[in-house]
Amino acid sequence: QVQLVESGGGLVQPGGSLRLSCAASRTIFFSIYTMAWYRQAPGKQRELVATLTSGGSTNYADSVKDRFTISRDNTKKTVYLQMNSLKPEDTAVYYCNAISSSADYWGPGTQVTVSS
């Protein structure tokens, strides 16, 4: 059973930074997966935040461009989301996703709250 576990969420003031991590269980050929971060705010649909392919290509939602950075360490089977200049509208549950041509895995999510 493949597991993804997010960590690093919490409460931060506007303008602050957080780094989320998502660790995959050992039973996954991590390097072949496209990794992504999604988020879901209360009363809203889940939205794509950032993606990082196995080849290193990245894509970001317009709302987080130039503030968030996705990266991965294949040796640690971990994907990261560095979030800078956080805004109250970034408040959401953040989910990690690993997808390939034959599989699609999700983590349980981690709460990020941006508030003064």
Image (cartoon, rainbow, N blue to C red):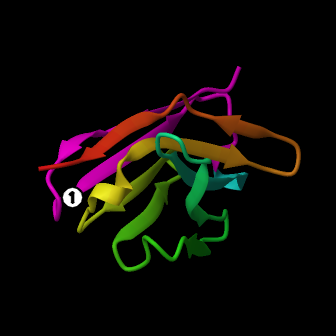
Which quarter shows the N terminus? top right
Residue 96 in the image, given as x and y percentages of width and height: 55, 43
Type of amino acid at the residue the image marks with label 1: Ser
Residue 111 in the image, given as x and y percentages of width and height: 37, 36
Residue 44 in the image, given as x and y percentages of width and height: 56, 47
Residue 12 in the image, given as x and y percentages of width and height: 17, 48
Seen from the viewer's position, the closer of residues 37 and 3 is 37
**Other-residue count near label 1 (Cα within 10 Å), few / some / many at <14 / 14–19 / ≥20:** some
Q: Quadrant of residue 69?
A: bottom left
Q: Magenta residues, as a range? A: 1-30
Q: Secondary structure at mark 1?
A: loop
In the picture of the structure, the residue carrying the numbered disc 1 is 17
Above/below status of 88 relative to 99 = below
Residue 38 falls left or right of residue 89 = right
Name the residue rendered at 14%, 53% in the picture: 13
Name the residue rendered at 28%, 56% in the picture: 88
Above/below status of 115 relative to 68 = above
Seen from the viewer's position, the closer of residues 27 and 57 is 57
Residue 65 falls left or right of residue 74 = left
Residue 45 falls left or right of residue 65 = right
Name the residue rendered at 27%, 62% in the picture: 87
Residue 57 falls left or right of residue 79 = right
Q: Quadrant of residue 102?
A: top right
Q: Is residue 116 magenta?
A: no
